Amino acid sequence: MFKHMLAKTNGRSFMALALAAALAPAGARADEAEVGAPPEVGVVTVERKEIVMTKDAPGRIAPMRIAEVRPRVSGIVLERAFEQGGVVEKGAVLYRIDPTQFQIDLDSVRAALAKAEAILFHAARQEDRLKALLNGQTTTQAQYDLALAAKRQAEADVLAQKAAVRRAEVNLEYATVRAPITGRIGRALVTEGALASQEQAASFATIQQLDPIYADFTQSVAEMNALKEEMERGGLKPKSGGAARTRLILDNGKTYPLEGKLLFSDVTVDPGTNQVTLRAQFPNPEAALLPGAYVRVQIEEGVRANTITLARQAIQRNNAGGAEVFVVNDQGRAVLQPVRLGRTLGEQVVVEEGLHPGNRVVVEGFQKFMSGGRVDPRPVSLGRTEAQGERG
């Protein structure tokens, strides 16, 4: 009987203790759980600074000039005189078309020119004689007029034959097909023995000028307007030196070593995408950039002062999708702080509201503590914290 009563009493005591523990304040439970050294976490100290705001967008490499090599006379191709895929200079011989017919035509019109010049010589002498006789009144005005007309007709014939000679010379020159521009030539589209024609649709080859070279990319109208508004408010100022500097990020993630310059923004908005086209020019002495290659074009838009940036890894998201960060307060506890974010700049993000200079924000060791728990903050360096470019 006594043992039964003792067991009943002990059971009631255990339940009372459990209930008391459940109703204990959360801070008291946290203090009990924090017995021992607080966990080490990596933090960065918030500061305001001047950053270079950049924007990068997907683009494609385009040649500065492109020329299709086409025949300007008809005939049989005798020789291809270039190496496929090589660099050709303007005026270099690319193809030779059989010149025999053109040389014959030239010889023929040259003979016709010589005949016309002989006729002119005779007509001129005749006009001179009759002019002298007319002054001595030993011939008639009608006879002199006929001689003068014959001379002028001979002069016209000479001019016509000279034009025919020039035309034949040009056709003979066109039998040698030359490079219209300096650049890299592609594969040969015709071979020796092929019949070339002025009316043919296919070209002989294509030449592309690759140094310098273009990078074409697009930007939305909304982004352009937002950038203009920020500059008008004074929040973003152009860098000294005028023209916006541009860089290329290659498809392997490496940065192209040579900087370029922004050339223009198209004045027409694409109604399908609501974007405008921009073009940047880059030096390409080693032909490392080839037409059609995918790149990311990075543009320095301007300088923004008194800006707070934070590593993206520090950003937490709540159930509503809002952005938060863990800030170590004066009591050494990591508490959540809501923030309003701005543009994403590579591995950094602009913090518009919610943080102040001197705040210590946790960037490493999130798995070691719970919200409100004590931590041991240790400063860490995450490398560059300047703007690295908004991913378009």
Image (cartoon, rainbow, N blue to C red):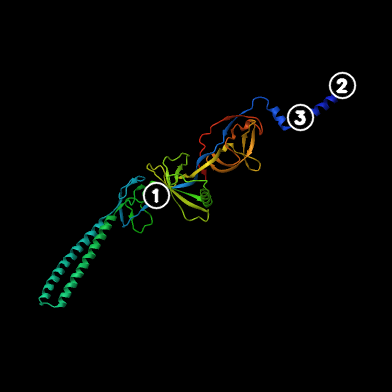
Q: Residues within 10 Å of mark 2 (few under 14, many from 20)?
A: few
The tag earlier along the polypeptide, 2 or 3, is: 2
The residue singled out by tag 1 in the image is 64
**Furthest residue in direction top, as rendered:** 2
Residue shown at 11%/75% (left/top)?
135
Q: Residues within 10 Å of mark 3 (few under 14, many from 20)?
A: few
- Examine the image and state in which quarter residue 73 appears: bottom left
Q: Is residue 315 depicted above or below 100 in this figure?
A: above
For the question of whether residue 124 can be seen, the reply is yes
Q: CA distance from mark 1 to mark 2?
A: 100 Å
Q: Is residue 273 depicted above or below 37 in this figure?
A: below
Q: Secondary structure at mark 3?
A: helix
Residue 305, given in percent of the width and then of the height, sits at 52, 42
Relative to 229, is 334 on the left or the right? right
Front one among 300 and 136: 300
The tag earlier along the polypeptide, 1 or 2, is: 2
Amino acid marked by disc 1: Met
